[in-house]
Image (tube, grey):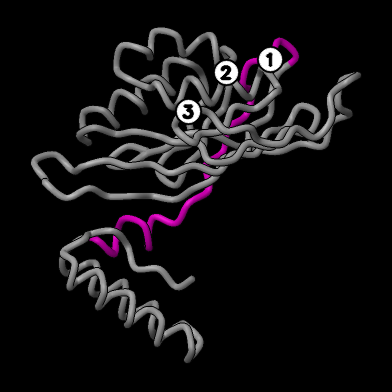
Amino acid sequence: MPAVSSECGFATSLEPPRGAGRAGPALGALGSTIPPDPRAARVVEFYEALTPQSLAGLDQVYAEDSRFIDPFNDVSGQSALRAVFEHMFQALDAPRFQVVLAVTEGDNCFLLWNFRFHRKGGKLASLVHGSTHVRFAADGRIALHRDYWDPAREVYETVPLLGSLMRWLRRKLAAPTAVLQIDASAAIDASSGSISPARTG
């Protein structure tokens, strides 16, 4: 996430290690996911406690040659990934991740998360919903991480002028019933003063 950047994903079909099966979520004190798989639990803990200081422990979570992809970045290696997170903390105020679901299958992990932040100097909070697909290396650290979220809807539509253009384009491309939902959601956001992106379901 840089300017708005994120974290997690990539998938590969690998035979699960002995004793490893599908791991469902358990809820922690904050409603976040505490996966029974220790590898996934380490990822959740890292992201939910992420601060500029905690980046010192990035090498405990990501392998040396790990690859990280999100809508704004495609980087490899711990140093490049650390730079992505450092940029995020420079560009945003109070960025915070909360994982709401984690499922593991063999060496793959799928996460659903919410990312909350303020733009520098801004007073209103923004919220991004996303998911991450992670593949673990043999030592349990992340080898591949890919984030899936929609920057057009989650970010660009909240920007004045550009947001109007993006919403107009989405109305033009959406099915007729979806257009009604887009207009209704936009009206609710405008009346509440929220800059959270409009939802269609």
157 relative position to 174: left or right = left
Spot occupied by residue 159 in the image (x, y as percentages of width and height):
20, 60
- Mark 2, Cα crowd under 10 Å, few <14 / some 14-19 / many 20+, is some
Marks 2 and 3 in Cβ contact (< 8 Å): no
The answer to which of marks 1 and 3 sits earlier in the sequence is 3
- Mark 3, Cα crowd under 10 Å, few <14 / some 14-19 / many 20+, is few
User: Which amino acid type corresponds to the residue marked 1 in the rendered image?
Assistant: Gly
The answer to which of marks 2 and 1 sits earlier in the sequence is 2
Q: Which mark is residue 72?
A: none
62 relative position to 165: left or right = right
Establish if 136 lies above or below 5.
Answer: above
Who's the residue at 27% across and 40% down the image?
117
Find the magenta span and give its range.
Answer: 138-158
Q: CA distance from mark 2 to mark 1?
A: 10 Å
Spot occupied by residue 60 in the image (x, y as percentages of width and height):
54, 9
Residue under numbered circle 3:
29
Q: Which mark is residue 42?
A: 2
User: Which amino acid type corresponds to the residue marked 2 in the rendered image?
Assistant: Arg
Spot occupied by residue 114 in the image (x, y as percentages of width and height):
43, 44
Q: CA distance from mark 1 to mark 3?
A: 25 Å
Which callout, 2 or 1, points to the residue nearer the camera? 2
- Mark 1, Cα crowd under 10 Å, few <14 / some 14-19 / many 20+, is some
Q: Which mark is residue 140?
A: 1
Establish if 3 lies above or below 48.
Answer: below
Who's the residue at 50% across and 34% down the image?
32
Which callout, 1 or 3, points to the residue nearer the camera? 3
Camera-nearest residue between 27 and 70: 27
Who's the residue at 54% across and 45% down the image?
131
Spot occupied by residue 38 in the image (x, y as percentages of width and height):
67, 17
User: Which amino acid type corresponds to the residue marked 3 in the rendered image?
Assistant: Ala
**Element type where label 3 sits in the image:** loop
